[in-house]
Amino acid sequence: MTPAITALETVHDGWAKMFVARVRTASGQEMRREIEHHGDAVAVLPYDPERRVATVIRQLRAPVLHQVGAGDIAEVAAGLLESDDPAECARREALEETGLALGQLELVATVWTMPGISTERMHLYLAPYGPADRQGPGGGLASEMEEVHAEEVSLDELARWSQDGRLADVKALVLLQALQLRRPDLFGAS
C-alpha cells in the first residue's frame, strides 16, 4: 500500500500554517500528525577569505527566549523564499541583514530542517565577500521588526564557538563545517 495523507485540517493560518493530517502508512495503519508549513527558506554564511572573517547575525528569537530565557543566538543570514530563485533570495536576505551585497554563491545543500514536523526545506549557501561588498549597516527590515545585529567574527573564533557550544544554530553549524571542509586553508595558522 502507498502511504498517503487521507485528510488535512487547517488549525492555524498565520505567518505559518498548522495542519492536522490523517496519514495512512504503507502497512495500512492510520495515524494523526501535525504539520507546520511556511515554505522553503535560504541561509547564507558570508566569509571574507582575505581577512579570514565571517559575518554572523543576532536577533531576538521568541522560541529561544521561551525555551532557555536568552533571546538571541549567533546565526547566519536567512529568510523565507519569496521568489523562485533561492540564490537571489539569499543575496536579498544577506543585504537586508548584514549590509553585504554578495555576488558568487556556493550551494552547500538543500536540506529538510525538521522533517518530523515542518515542510521547510532550506537552501544553504557559502558566499565569499570583501570590504567593497559592504553596502550598508544591515539590521534587517524595520517593517518586520527584525532588529538584526550583524558582526564580523574571525573564522578561528567561529570554529571555537562551534566546539564549545556557543554556536548553537544548526544552519550556522552546517555552513561553518562545510567551509572548514571545503576551505581548510582559511582556518588555523597561515
Image (spheres, helix red, strand yellow):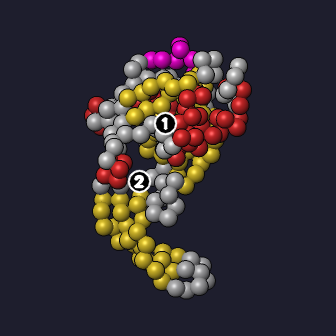
Per the rendering, the mark at residue 162 is none
Per the rendering, the mark at residue 76 is 1
Is 133 one of the magenta-colored residues? yes
Task: Give the amino acid type for the residue marked by disc 2 in the picture.
Answer: His
Residue at 57% across, 17% down? 130
Residue at label 2?
38
Closer to the camera in the image, 167 or 112: 167
Residue 79 coordinates in the image, percent (x, y): 44, 41
Q: Quadrant of the C terminus?
A: top right
Residue 151 coordinates in the image, percent (x, y): 44, 25
Write down the quadrant of residue 60 in the picture.
top left
Which one is closest to the eye, mark 2 or mark 1? Answer: 1
Left or right of 35? Residue 170 is: right
Q: Quadrant of the N terminus?
A: bottom right
For the record, the magenta segment spans 129-135
Task: Give the amino acid type for the residue marked by disc 1 in the picture.
Answer: Val
Q: Above or below — where is 34 with respect to 89?
A: below
Residue at 55% across, 55% down? 112
Is 108 one of the magenta-colored residues? no
Residue at 53% across, 36% down? 161
Left or right of 165? Residue 35 is: left
Closer to the camera in the image, 60 or 108: 60
Is label 1 in a helix, a strand or a loop? loop
Residue at 31% across, 52% down? 66
Q: Above or below — where is 139 with respect to 190?
A: below
